[in-house]
Image (spheres, grey):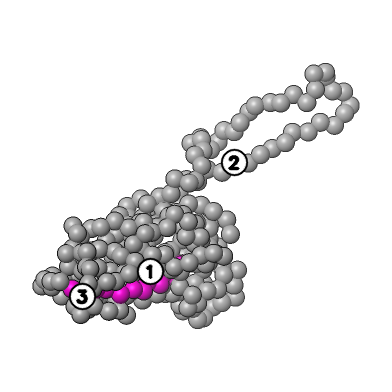
Amino acid sequence: MKKTSKIFGAVALSAALAMGCAVPAFAADLGSGDGTVDASTDNPVVNSAVSTDVKVKARISQIDVTVPLNVTIVADAAGGPLGVPSEGIKTFTAQNTADISGYRIENESSFPVAITNIATTDSSSGDWKLVSTINNASITGAVGDLAIKLEPSDAVNKDSEDSDLTTGTKNEGNKATGATPIDLATGSNDPKWTVAAKPNEQQTASIMGLKMSGSGSELQGVSSALTTTGVDAFRITFTVAATSL
């Protein structure tokens, strides 16, 4: 399996991650609240109990989520199944410490995050085309076509409440009811994916391991860059928002 790049980008800098606009906008001044007073009566109250209802608003100052900046897939010139990145996984090495590897989304936030949209854009100037089904008789990309699906890994799926786990592997990404693999040719505006909050007792982020699968068409041309360093094909953009499990 092709290993993912170990280079990560913070949300504010990553070219592969877009911040979600689904989070409501709140006042920037966290120290002041709404001082509106609703009078309980028109007459003075003497020796009687009165009450004030208090509401709480939240201001989401930062969503701390990262994804790998680069992953590489391998397409055979004759077409067929793609070589894809390894699924993300967390392997505990000691109490509350772990090694994380593979293709994944990491959540360092103190609250869960939802993936509210997944979209792709062509970064190959038409050399590659994402399609839902490979048809070698009708290849639309100048070099070739790719049919790829993406979904949360189900190889290991233990929730973040399992704080007793000190060895072995773990994956805090939850595949919600109704969640299905995403066809990258069309994307999804409601993938129903969530990643649990970072457990307070752990030094490592919560992760959602990602599983990629797919096939490619016969290639209509092979450059030296394609067989050595690889070439740009497309970009996956994840939109994230604060949520609750």
Residue pictured at 35% horizontal, 63% vertical: 184
Residue at the extreme front of the image, as rendered:
137
Against 46, residue 157 (above or below) is below
Image coords of residue 151 (percent x, y): 43, 68
Three-letter code for the amino acid on which mark 1 is drawn:
Lys
Q: For marks 2 and 3, give the CA distance.
A: 55 Å
The magenta-colored residue range is 207-219
Q: For marks 1 and 2, give the CA distance.
A: 38 Å
Circle 3 Cα neighbour tier, 10 Å, few/some/many (<14 / 14–19 / ≥20) = many
Q: Earlier in the sequence, mark 1 or mark 2?
A: 2
Q: Which residue is mark 3?
A: 218
Three-letter code for the amino acid on which mark 3 is drawn:
Glu
Residue at the extreme right of the image, as rendered:
47
Foreground mark, 1 or 2, reads 1
Residue pictured at 37% horizontal, 59% vertical: 186
Q: Secondary structure at mark 1?
A: strand
Q: What secondary structure do most residues of the magenta stretch adopt?
A: strand
Against 2, residue 48 (above or below) is above
Residue 218 lies in the magenta stretch: yes
Q: Is residue 98 visible?
A: no
Q: Which residue is mark 1?
A: 149
Q: Which mark is residue 57?
A: 2
Three-letter code for the amino acid on which mark 2 is drawn:
Lys
Is there a contact, CB below 8 Å, between mark 1 and mark 2?
A: no
Foreground mark, 3 or 1, reads 3
Circle 2 Cα neighbour tier, 10 Å, few/some/many (<14 / 14–19 / ≥20) = few
Image coords of residue 131 (percent x, y): 30, 65
Q: Secondary structure at mark 2?
A: loop
Q: Secondary structure at mark 3?
A: loop
Foreground mark, 2 or 3, reads 3
Corner quadrant of residue 228: bottom left
Against 206, residue 215 (above or below) is below
